[in-house]
Image (tube, rainbow, N blue to C red):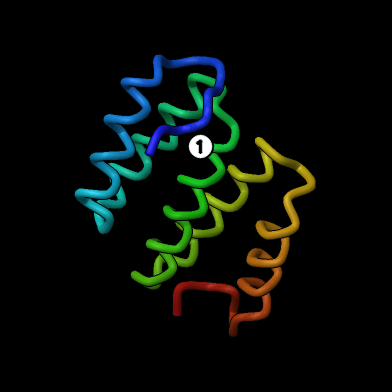
Amino acid sequence: SRLPEEPGAPVEERERLEQLRRAYPEDLLLLRAIAEFHIEHEQRDAALDTLFALAGGLFERRNVEGMRQALEQVLVFDPENARAFRLLGLLEKRPNGTDD
């Protein structure tokens, strides 16, 4: 499937990144690099999607602080993002609001 057009990087580069993401879904460093690529090329929707995937992967690994940072980065891109606010609110309700 082809990705919707966004300004920035050529479609071929974006498609290659999506292939890598599908091939290595558990690689959080790869997700971080892909998110940074989309941010650098001002591809808002792709960046948000990748940041949420990164936040989910970090949460599964009990890296609450990393998840918080990924969600805060979502809010830099999209200050009114209800999903990011909701997830951050749930993090704050955790005991201590920490990784424990």
Residue at the image position 51 percent from the left and 46 percent from the top = 49
- x, y percentage for residue 42? 56, 22
| Residue drawn at x 55%, y 58% as measured from the top left | 68
Residue at the disc numbered 1: 46
Q: Is residue 88 above or below residue 95?
A: above
The furthest residue to the left: 23
Q: Position of residue 21 (x, y in %)?
A: 29, 45
Quarter of the image containing the N terminus? top left
Residues 49 and 77: in front is 49
Identify the secondary structure beneath mark 1. helix
Q: Decide: few, some or many residues near mark 1? Use Cα within 10 Å; few <14, some 14-19, many ≥20.
A: some
* Residue at screen point 30% across, 33% down: 17
Give the percent coordinates (x, y) of residue 78: 71, 40
Please indicate whether residue 16 sits to the left or right of residue 75 in the image: left
Quarter of the image where the C terminus is located: bottom left
Q: Nearer the viewer, residue 29 or 93?
A: 29
Q: Amino acid at mark 1?
A: Ala
Residue drawn 53% across the image and 51% down it: 69
**Looking at the picture, how far across and down is residue 63, in whole percent?**
41, 66
Relative side of 97 to 81, left or right: left
